[in-house]
């Protein structure tokens, strides 16, 4: 294994080990996602039936909201124990540290989604699981895109006093293509006449988004994290 | 530069004074009638806004990788002007839409992407204002990511929906309209250049004052600050 991959792997392992011991982020995030679903159900369910496409929208909003929470908490932990500085001082490639943090966030979001998708499918009678591979592709590309931008901004915001409010303020406008792609792609999959070509288009666009923003993040992480 | 400034200002003032006359004399569009006249302000403002986002994004990139303070000042000035011209676009647009479409706002591709772009630059200014120490790097990333995001926002919102008149409207203008239109574009660009120059000068002076203050502080000559 190359040095880069090894550092990324160790950073991710560290994050997941800390998380597995406390289970703080995963349990609060999942519960928060559930609360989101509930709040949106009150807004969008009329006479016991959901508005068309509501399930897709609720799923992605819950992912975006709980993702923000998970990102904030992950870096809050680093800030509280002042370990981000230690990570930055470690004789390792900065981009590798970024990739490690990104993988950790993606893993936590994936765990949340595994619980969230069946829940939304069940509560809103949506056929989310009828085309599992396409949905998985949408979720994977969407989550990576969201987390790629989110990890970079959350890492930078560790130093800012107003990080709690600035993270969503910065993250949502920039990740709007992810939300549109995720929602429209999922809606195309669960529509009465499923439109796989449409979902395919969104997966491709999200993939392109991932490539551009992961590259841009790797490229800017070093100058951005240098004080 | 300083001598050129009053001349430029006078020309811009004359151009903006003449614009209403020219707009009045331009042929009235057959289907939309009088409402179409807002086009002469709306489109040049939008063009200036887009120009400004690219100025800010590129200057942010230069700042991030070369560490030049001057580039940061350009990025900040351009971000502020993006918000100013964006506000013009977002006010004149709905005024026209109310008459042409019967509603103030439509979730159309161009409207949504302009709003999002504007929001990214408002976020830039929020970071700048409340981000605390190191916020200039963070905001540079916002600007750079915002610029990279433009094509994604555009494509995704475009597939989502489109109502707005196409950009192909401009080359097909009738001769009477075309002259007036380009006159207005020139007036807006001149105004942009002037505001940019004024803002940059202010930024430079602020930096100088800061430098002087630091020098005085180092020498211990600083009079005790009144609290």
Image: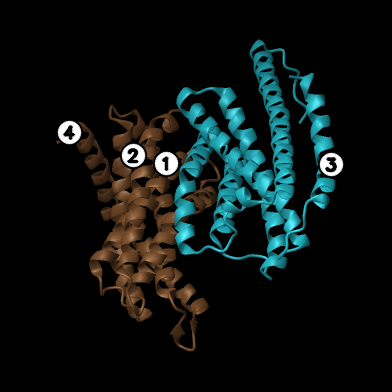
Chain colours: A brown, B cyan
Chain of the residue displaying label 1: A
Between marks 3 and 1 in the image, the one whose residue lies nearer the viewer: 3
Residue for badge 3: B18
| Residue visible at 61% across and 29% down in the picture | B74
Q: How many marks?
A: 4
Q: Can you name the residue that lies furthest to the bottom here?
A: A47
User: Is the same chain shared between marks 4 and 3?
Assistant: no
At label 2, counting other C-alpha atoms closer than 10 Å, the crowd grade (few under 14, some 14-19, many 20 or more) is: many
Q: Quadrant of residue A151?
A: top left
Tell me, yes or no, if residue B179 can be seen here: yes
Indicate the position of residue B45 as horizontal and vertical percent values. 68, 46
Q: CA distance from mark 4 to mark 1?
A: 24 Å
Query: Horizontal placement of B203 versus B5: left or right?
Result: left
Q: Disc 4 on helix, strand or loop?
A: loop
Question: Do the residues under discs 2 and 1 have CB atoms within 8 angstroms?
Answer: yes
Q: Is residue B109 above or below residue B45?
A: below
Q: Distance of mark 4 from mark 3, alpha carbons?
A: 67 Å
Residue where numbered disc 2 is placed: A98
Where residue A199 appears, as percent x and y from the top left, is: 33, 64
Residue A142 image point, x, y percent: 35, 56
* Res B41 seen here: no
- Find disc 4 in the rendering and name its residue: A2
């Amino acid at each position: 294994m190359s040095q880069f991959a090894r550092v990324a792997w160790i950073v991710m392992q560290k994050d997941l080990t800390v998380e597995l011991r406390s289970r703080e982020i995963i349990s609060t995030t999942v519960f928060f996602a559930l609360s989101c679903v509930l709040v949106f159900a009150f807004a969008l369910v009329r006479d016991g039936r959901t508005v068309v496409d509501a399930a897709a929208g609720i799923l992605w909003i819950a992912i975006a909201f709980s993702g923000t929470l998970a990102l904030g908490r992950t870096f809050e932990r680093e800030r509280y124990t002042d370990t981000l500085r230690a990570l930055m001082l470690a004789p390792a490639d900065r981009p590798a540290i970024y990739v490690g943090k990104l993988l950790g966030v993606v893993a936590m979001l994936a765990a949340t989604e595994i619980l969230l998708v069946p829940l939304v499918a069940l509560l809103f009678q949506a056929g989310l699981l009828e085309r599992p591979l396409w949905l998985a592709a949408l979720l994977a590309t969407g989550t990576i895109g969201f987390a790629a931008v989110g990890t970079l901004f959350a890492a930078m915001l560790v130093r800012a006093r107003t990080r709690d409010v600035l993270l969503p303020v910065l993250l949502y406008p920039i990740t709007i293509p992810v939300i549109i792609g995720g929602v429209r792609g999922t809606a195309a999959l669960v529509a009465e006449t499923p439109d796989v070509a449409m979902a395919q288009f969104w997966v491709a666009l999200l993939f392109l988004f991932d490539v551009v923003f992961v590259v841009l993040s790797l490229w800017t992480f070093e100058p951005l994290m240098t004080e | 530069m300083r001598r050129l400034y009053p001349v430029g200002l006078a020309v811009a003032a004359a151009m903006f004074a003449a614009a209403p006359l020219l707009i009045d004399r331009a042929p009235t569009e057959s289907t939309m009638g009088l409402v179409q006249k807002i086009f002469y302000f709306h489109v040049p403002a939008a063009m200036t806004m887009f120009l400004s986002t690219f100025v800010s994004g590129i200057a942010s990139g230069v700042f991030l990788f070369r560490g030049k303070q001057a580039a940061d000042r350009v990025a900040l000035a351009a971000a502020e002007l993006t918000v100013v011209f964006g506000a013009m676009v977002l006010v004149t647009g709905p005024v026209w839409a109310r008459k042409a479409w019967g509603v103030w706002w439509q979730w159309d591709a161009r409207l949504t992407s302009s709003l999002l772009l504007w929001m990214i630059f408002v976020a830039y200014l929020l970071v700048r204002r409340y981000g605390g120490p190191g916020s200039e790097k963070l905001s540079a990333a916002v600007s750079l990511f915002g610029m990279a995001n433009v094509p994604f926002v555009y494509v995704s919102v475009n597939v989502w929906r489109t109502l707005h008149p196409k950009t192909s409207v401009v080359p097909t203008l009738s001769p009477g309209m075309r002259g007036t239109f380009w006159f207005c574009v020139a007036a807006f660009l001149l105004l942009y250049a002037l505001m940019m120059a004024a803002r940059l000068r202010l930024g430079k002076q602020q930096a100088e004052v800061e430098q002087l203050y630091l020098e005085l502080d180092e020498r211990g000559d600083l009079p005790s600050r009144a609290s």
